[in-house]
Image (cartoon, helix red, strand yellow):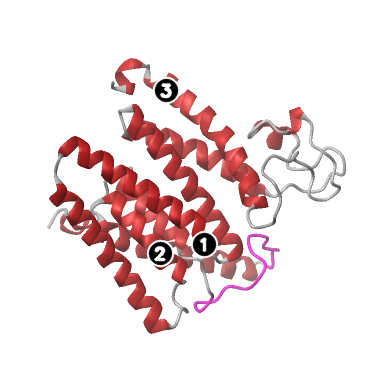
């Protein structure tokens, strides 16, 4: 059944965004408690004073805005990361809903982007990608391929997708091996496998190129902002250490951005390069 035909577009987007920010709130809990030994079922509390948060302090997006980014009890700053994760998850849910029409594809897509949000933010914070998240993505990718195989009955397409994903992974492995882990981490190598399998053999190249383009653009922008802020002698609170051209930057977020540009927006690098030629 076509979801877009069954619901008004604005209503579908509203539902998906609302559901997304709720899931984003849960993902914040996962990000905070993953590998800490803490249960996901425990009550949320202020990270500064330890006060248990009330219901009005746990409303996604709105609580952060109403509290102006501060704890209601001790007035300590709440990391803006919590707000951004909720907002990003909501927006990604909308994009997934506009991309996939069937319920099965929609549910699978929402799960995939939820895991990717955790991967990206966790890598930004800790410079590591937990294996359980990569294995989850591999399972989801195989599930998607299995569904496609049942529908299309085309085992050759599955073989092509698997081969392209393997080649993409080997490309990242080569970079990791040559640089001895200084250019990217081994977690990025493992992450490339499920992402390549999901986008398929026709889009793996575009995903890889877009990830490097994105990384280069973001890196140059951050360096420019830091340079301009130093000239103006204004305090910069975006990061804790000085960035240089040799600074280590997590690559997983850029690989995920490249993946999303291909998967959700059908961006094709070859078409971009040949456009107008």
Specify which label sits upstream in the sequence, 1 or 2.
Answer: 1
Q: Return the mark for residue 129.
A: 1
Q: Secondary structure at mark 1?
A: loop
Tell me residue 92's x, y (percent): 45, 39
Q: Whole-Å distance between the Cαs marked 1 and 2?
A: 9 Å
Q: Would you place residue 125 above or below residue 173 in this image?
A: above
- Residue 162 seen in this snapshot: yes
Magenta-colored stretch includes residue 239: yes
Residues at discs 1 and 2 in contact (Cβ within 8 Å): yes
* Res 235 quadrant in image: bottom right
For the record, the magenta segment spans 233-247
Q: Residue at x 32, y 49 (%)?
A: 142
Task: State which quarter of the image contains the C terminus.
Answer: bottom left
Question: Residue at left 43%, top 26%?
Answer: 13
Q: Quadrant of the N terminus?
A: top left
* Residue 52, quarter of the rendered image: top right
Sequence-wise first label, 1 or 3: 3
Residue annotated with mark 2? 190
> Is 3 placed above or below 215 here?
above
Badge 3 crowding class, 10 Å Cα cut-off, few under 14, some 14 to 19, many 20 or more, is: some
- 10 Å crowding of disc 1: few (<14), some (14-19), many (20+): many
Task: Tell me, for residue 12, which label it has, or none.
Answer: 3
Question: How far, Cα to Cα, is label 1 from label 3?
Answer: 33 Å
């Amino acid at each position: 059944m076509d979801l877009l035909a069954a619901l008004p577009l604005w209503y579908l987007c509203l539902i998906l965004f609302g559901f997304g920010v709720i899931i984003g709130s849960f993902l914040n809990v996962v990000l905070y408690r993953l590998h800490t030994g803490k249960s996901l079922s425990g009550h949320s509390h202020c990270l500064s004073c330890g006060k248990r948060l009330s219901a009005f302090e746990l409303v996604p997006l709105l609580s952060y805005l109403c509290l102006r980014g501060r704890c209601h009890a001790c007035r300590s700053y709440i990391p803006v990361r919590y707000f951004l994760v909720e907002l990003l998850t909501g927006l990604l849910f909308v994009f997934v809903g506009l991309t996939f029409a069937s319920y099965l594809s929609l549910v699978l897509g929402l799960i995939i982007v939820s895991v990717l949000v955790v991967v990206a933010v966790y890598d930004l914070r800790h410079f590591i990608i937990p294996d359980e998240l990569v294995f989850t993505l591999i399972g989801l990718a195989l599930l998607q391929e299995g569904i496609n195989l049942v529908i299309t009955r085309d085992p050759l397409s599955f073989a092509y997708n698997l081969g392209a994903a393997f080649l993409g992974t080997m490309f990242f492995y080569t970079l990791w091996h040559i640089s001895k882990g200084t250019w990217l981490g081994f977690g990025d190598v493992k992450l490339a496998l499920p992402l390549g399998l999901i986008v398929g053999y026709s889009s793996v190249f575009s995903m890889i190129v877009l990830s490097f383009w994105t990384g280069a653009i973001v890196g140059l922008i951050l360096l420019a902002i830091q340079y301009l802020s130093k000239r103006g002698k204004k305090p910069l609170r975006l990061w804790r250490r000085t960035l240089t051209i040799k600074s280590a930057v997590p690559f997983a977020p850029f690989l995920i951005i490249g993946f999303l540009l291909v998967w959700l927006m059908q961006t094709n690098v070859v078409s971009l390069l040949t456009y107008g030629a």
